Image (spheres, rainbow, N blue to C red):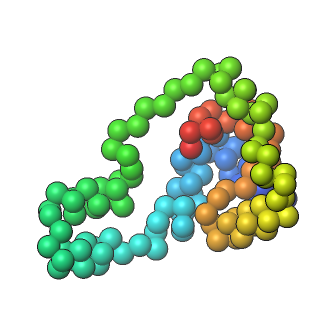
């Protein structure tokens, strides 16, 4: 993963006061599903007799977000334990494949690369 990309993302994250949701909104594209044509998809689904309540739920998920209600809390000790335990052992066993996959995911805007040390300072990053 490109160090310059991770630094640029970090600078943008700092600009948005460490608010990851604003960084995602700023980055747009695949992060926000801006490429989707929700109206066309709903018209296609409606032509297959999909119930209206499901179409409404789909529209909400695609335009507002999912889930409708989300509450997440964890004590600081739990987050630090997660961080200290590190990655699953299969990551190190397949590091070349993992790094190639992460580079591709970053290139295609499916993940936001950040320096590894940022985790400790960004509120709610474990949930984002």
Residue 40 picture quarter: bottom left
Judging depth in this view, the residue of 45 and 110 nearest the camera is 45
Question: Considering only vertical position in the picture, is 116 above or below 76?
Answer: below
Look at 47% across and 66% down and name the residue there: 33
Is residue 40 something one can see in this rendering? yes
| Left or right, 118 with reference to 54 | right
Identify the residue shown where x is 72% and y is 26%: 81
Nearest to the observer: residue 102 or residue 108: 102
- Quarter of the image for the N terminus: give it: bottom right
Pinpoint residue 93: horizontal percent, then vertical percent. 84, 54
Q: As displayed, is residue 75 above or below residue 8?
A: above
Residue 123 location, x and y as percent?
62, 33
Q: Which is nearer the eye, 29 or 14?
A: 29
Residue 4 in view of the camera: no
Q: Quadrant of the C terminus?
A: top right
How many numbered marks are there? Answer: 0
> Can you give x and y, in whole percent of width and height, for residue 56 in the image?
21, 59
Residue name at image x 64 percent, y 59 percent: 111
The image quadrant that residue 117 belongs to is top right
x 21%, y 59%: residue = 54
List x then y, in percent, for residue 83.
75, 33
Quadrant of res 121: top right
């Amino acid at each position: 993963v490109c160090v310059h990309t991770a630094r640029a993302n970090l600078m943008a994250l700092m600009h948005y006061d460490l608010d990851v949701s604003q960084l995602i909104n700023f980055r747009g594209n695949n992060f926000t599903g801006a490429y989707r044509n929700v109206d066309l998809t709903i018209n296609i689904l409606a032509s297959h007799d999909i119930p209206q309540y499901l179409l409404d739920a789909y529209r909400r998920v695609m335009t507002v977000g999912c889930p409708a209600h989300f509450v997440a809390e964890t004590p600081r000790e739990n987050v630090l334990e997660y961080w200290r335990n590190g990655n699953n052992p299969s990551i190190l066993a397949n590091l070349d494949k993992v790094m190639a996959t992460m580079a591709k995911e970053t290139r295609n805007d499916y993940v936001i690369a950040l320096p590894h040390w940022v985790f400790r300072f960004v509120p709610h990053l474990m949930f984002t």
